[in-house]
Image: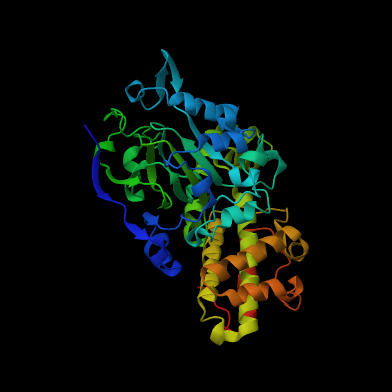
Amino acid sequence: MGIIIKGEIERVNGKELSYIEFVDRYMEKNKPVVITGLMDHWRAHSDWVTLHSQPNFQFFSTHFGASKVQKREEMLVSDFIARCLLQEEASPVQCNNETCAINGASVSVPYLKDWHFVKEYPEYVAYETPRFFCDDWLNLYLDNFKIHIDSDTQQPNEEICCSDYRFVYIGVKGSWTPLHADVFRSYSWSSNVCGKKKWLFLDPSQCHLIFDRNMKNCVYNIFDEVSNSKFPGFSKAIWLECTQDAGEIIFVPSGWYHQVHNLEDTISINHNWFNAYNLSWVWNLLVRDYNEAKDYIEDIKDICDDFEGLCQRNLAANTGMNFYDFFTFMSYFTLANLVLLRYINRRYGSATGSSSTIAQHLSMNLGCLRKTASEMKHVRALEGNHNCVVDITKAFEDRRFSKLFMHVGRTYAMVHEQSHLASDFESSTMSDLMDFNNSKSYTSQIYTPEDLIQFIDNVVAEEEPSVLRVT
């Protein structure tokens, strides 16, 4: 019995879409969309593609062949390209979803995933992130800080595997990605530099249908013969289908399970990211995975000296971050948004400050951060923590935070087309921007979600209500 496909993904011309329209119609509503018309000027469009619109494998082998990448095992890009070229010798009838037969031997279909290209080649600007996707807290943070604050949670090769979530994918015809939802329940955007993909999407409201009776295991391949006894709801799932051509970008919202097939030899660029609009998705995933990690080792609770610490270490290993990592991340972004909002309102006044789209955006961010901190407090996350997560005075002296703050400011000035603010940020000193020295009631150190909530409330209370408002 085949799957039920009803509906397609909307397509829009990116040149005719404003940032506010993208937010209102897609990001805030958590709705997928295909965006066209934004990739013509990318260097990747010319360097990585042959005149016949095929992947320029030779270019990759010549310029990036020495890179080491993970494809089941560590290998050089040049070796991967050699496999791709060998693959072209195989007849399509000799291939299935997993393997191809070449000269009588069975080999896996080559698919290079999660190549941290930007981190490896920062001087080679292959593309620019479309402004719809620039409010990317995850990668802005990782450009300046490590994701893990506890050295015990550091994983092997973390400098590579957790350095960022900006990837290049290269897959030959027939390669594919099994059904999944994205890491951290983040947003993602995926651009086809060349080639063609088929996507199958499932709305988050139906995702329970693809799990087994215990809600533990998800269907691997929706085109397999799926057991009705093991996955009783699967046949009721209604899928959206989309064919993505070269030069098109797909916005994948949070929590949408999807399966992707390369219909041709394909090169794509993919980012995972989150911001205020989907922060709750990230927190809800962490809570779910924490509870699972805790239940799994519940039987050793009475003999474990640091049961909570073990739960957090397991959470970081399984999910990619734990409560401490996430709260540290939230604290830095809270500080950056508060500083920016105070600066705008004090420099331009309430008439041009609070009424501006950028001030409204910052207020919305702070409201979402405060709400998430309240949810953390409600489940007693980090309760009784005696290690300072963020020292605000020290943060102002930390070059990493200064870089993060300035990048956040430039990003919002760009997406909201307020270039004068970008100029102001560049010309101002950090002491001008971070004017908290005269604040009488701000908390110097953040230990718990309750501290963060109090910090937000105190700063807001010091300002005139009409000047600084957190929504």
Question: Looking at the image, which is closer to me, 279 or 382?
Answer: 279
Residue 449, horizontal then vertical, whole percent? 61, 60
Question: Looking at the image, which is closer to me, 377 or 270?
Answer: 270
Name which residue lies at 53% across and 56% down: 129
Q: In this view, does 444 lie above or below 428?
A: above
Q: Is residue 469 shown to the viewer in this render?
A: yes
Residue that extends furthest to the left in the rendered view of this protein: 1
Residue 252, horizontal then vertical, whole percent? 42, 51
Q: Is residue 84 above or below residue 151?
A: above
Name which residue lies at 53% across and 60% down: 134
Residue that extends furthest to the front in the rendered view of this protein: 51
Query: In this figure, what is the number of numbered marks?
Result: 0
Residue that extends furthest to the top in the rendered view of this protein: 104
Answer left or right for 334 relative to 35: right
Q: In which quarter of the image is residue 445?
A: bottom right
Image quarter hosting the N terminus: top left
Question: Looking at the image, which is closer to me, 246 or 397?
Answer: 246
Residue 151, horizontal then vertical, whole percent? 72, 42
Residue 342, horizontal then vertical, whole percent? 64, 77
Q: Quadrant of residue 340?
A: bottom right
Q: Is residue 458 shown to the viewer in this render?
A: no
Q: In this view, does 439 lie above or below 93?
A: below
Question: Looking at the image, which is closer to me, 318 or 51?
Answer: 51
Answer left or right for 271 relative to 175: right
How has the structure been colored for display? rainbow
Q: Quadrant of residue 140?
A: bottom right
Answer left or right for 315 relative to 188: right
